[in-house]
Amino acid sequence: MIILLPPFRDNADIHDYLEIDELPNNLWDGKIAFLDRDGVINVGSENYINSPDEVKLLPNAGFSIGKLRRHGYRICVVTNQSPIGRGLWDHENLHLIHKRISELLIGEDKDAKLDLILYSPYTPWDNSWARKPNPGMLEAGRQILSNSFKQNIGILYGNDWINRPDESKSVMVGDRDVDQLAAEKYGVSFFRCDPNIGLYDVVELILGEKNG
């Protein structure tokens, strides 16, 4: 049975208002690049990324994110982080990891800002709607980025979210089947990248298909 455990937002409450910087060259027309983290932005590990010192960006990750934002995409990271649910470390440690990733990205490309980072701290056996392959993080990401939810209503998920926007210009990038399944359940185009190359592997394909 799938349980509606909500996603978490990096260093903020999920319902906090999001102050969004303007995009480098374009007014935002609503398109989002939903990105998995490990194997897309940074080098992954079978034993998890457990500290900021373990963070290593994949080649041209910053350039690729900057390029997407220069082409009008908001960037929403959606990442499963079960070490929290497994009791290996806490939310603050994850924030420090994300802070390090963000610093390295900006150091590579000044436009490589992560507009929103969402994560699922739940284990696979929690059966949470927020954990990929379920689409809860993508659903929340859209509503937060567009500021379309109200405090008295909250973020809507699954069958409760009726009036959904057109996502034909948005994309999801991941390196695993769970990423593809989450994209399919949400209804957004999926691009699978080589986990040794990451986002740079598919960024030109994304821009060619979506903007060509």
Image (cartoon, grey):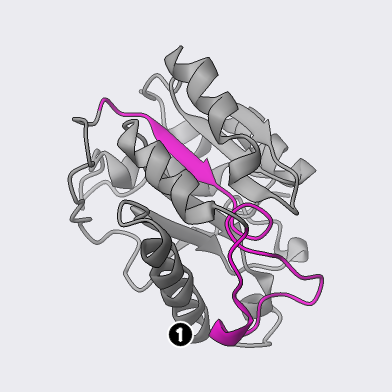
In the depicted structure, whether residue 190 falls above or below residue 121: above
Residue at the far top in the pictured view: 212
Residue 69 is situated, as x and y percent measured from the top left of the image, at 35, 40
Q: Which residue is mark 1?
A: 92
Is residue 110 toward the left or the right of residue 10 in the image?
Answer: left
Residue at the spot x=63%, y=52% of the render? 40
What kind of element bears circle 1?
A: helix
> From this viewpoint, is residue 156 visible?
no
Is residue 107 toward the left or the right of residue 21 in the image?
Answer: right
How many numbered circles does the render carry? 1
Image quarter for residue 41? bottom right
In the depicted structure, whether residue 33 falls above or below residue 85: above
User: Which residue type does callout 1 highlight?
Assistant: Glu
Residue at the spot x=49%, y=58% of the render? 6
Give the residues drawn in magenta, as a range.
Answer: 29-58
How many residues crowd mark 1 within 10 Å: few (<14), some (14–19), many (20+)?
Answer: few
Image quarter for residue 146? top left
Along the line of sight, which residue is nearer the eye, 67 or 147?
Answer: 67
Residue 116 is situated, as x and y percent measured from the top left of the image, at 37, 55
Asked whether 47 falls inside the magenta stretch, the response is: yes
Is residue 120 toward the left or the right of residue 164 in the image?
Answer: right
In the depicted structure, whether residue 66 falls above or below residue 8: above
Asked whether 28 falls inside the magenta stretch, the response is: no
Q: What type of secondary structure mainly makes up the magenta span?
A: loop
Residue 168 is situated, as x and y percent measured from the top left of the image, at 46, 18
In the depicted structure, whether residue 131 falls above or below residue 149: below
Along the line of sight, which residue is nearer the eye, 180 or 126?
Answer: 180
Residue 183 is situated, as x and y percent measured from the top left of the image, at 61, 34
> From this viewpoint, is residue 54 visible?
yes
Along the line of sight, which residue is nearer the eye, 47 or 105?
Answer: 105
